[in-house]
Amino acid sequence: MVRTDRAPRAPRPGAGLSVPAIIRLAPILRLEDLDELRRRGRDVYDHGTFRPLLQEEPIPVVVDHGERATGHVREFAYRAAPEGGTWCFAHCLLDDPPGWLRRGTPASFESVLRRTIDLGGIEGVVDQRVTEVTLCSSSFGAVEPLARVEWVGEPSKDSPANRGAGEIPSPGVRIRRYSGSVLGVR
């Protein structure tokens, strides 16, 4: 009998397993949500602003904005969150996840070349390049209180990260409609 009522354990470093994860990052600007976002005092992001700095390089997933990558972002997706509103989610593949990684672990990201506009008390980000996604340990706080790991999958040896060199497809950013259909890949 397989127990499914507990979170999967992160594999030991060097175990040759990869773990898929979905990380909620930031709210996306929708005009119908603007008053609520102003009330909360949060920055908001324009749809499609989550893009890599360099198209050829995957965006690394790190711990506490550190140097060592524990995985990479495969794509960004935009969809509704349980608390309401549209959010950007990073679909990641973690090759060396920390042992404390669980659903609900705080998360963050770092970006450069950020261009913003004033939306009457909150900042609207209309362009940026994401340089990393961060898993935050208990000693490191996330700026966005609802940014967190939403899902951690089972470790797998069949993951694309475990294929030979040259077999991993480019982790380009998929541009999606709200309905989920893919418009293109950058």
Image (cartoon, helix red, strand yellow):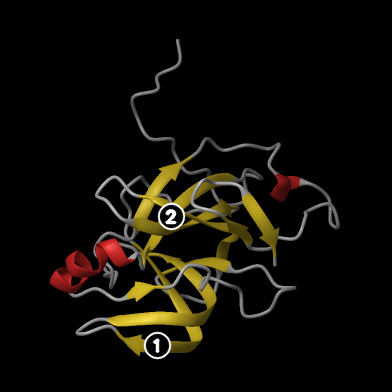
Q: Which residue in the protein does label 2 denote?
A: 23
152 lies above or below 98: above
Question: In the image, residue 77 lies at what x, y percent?
Answer: 52, 55
Question: As rendered, which of 84 and 9 lies closer to the eye?
Answer: 84
Question: In the image, residue 114 lies at what x, y percent?
Answer: 47, 87
How many residues crowd mark 2 within 10 Å: few (<14), some (14–19), many (20+)? many
Name the residue at the top extreme: 1
Q: Residue at x 54, y 46 (%)?
A: 180
Name the disc covering residue 142, or none.
Answer: none
Question: In the image, residue 153 lies at what x, y percent?
Answer: 50, 38
Question: In the image, residue 42 lies at what x, y percent?
Answer: 24, 73
Q: Residue at x 47, y 49 (%)?
A: 22
Where's the N terminus, which quadrant? top left
Q: Which residue in the protein does label 1 denote?
A: 116
| Callout count | 2
Residue 175 appearing in the image: yes
152 lies above or below 114: above
Q: Earlier in the sequence, mark 1 or mark 2?
A: 2
C-alpha separation, residue under disc 1 versus residue under disc 2: 23 Å
Name the residue at the front extreme: 32
Q: Residue at x 45, y 16 (%)?
A: 2
Amino acid under disc 1: Thr
Of circles 1 and 2, the one toward us is 1
Question: As rendered, which of 131 and 122 lies closer to the eye?
Answer: 122
Amino acid under disc 2: Ile
In the image, taking residue 127 as reference, residue 87 lies left or right, namely: left
How many residues crowd mark 1 within 10 Å: few (<14), some (14–19), many (20+)? some
SS category of the residue bearing label 1: strand
Q: Could you say which quadrant of the image residue 103 lies in?
A: top left
Q: Could you say which quadrant of the image residue 86 lies in?
A: bottom left
Q: Residue at x 71, y 36 (%)?
A: 158
SS category of the residue bearing label 2: strand
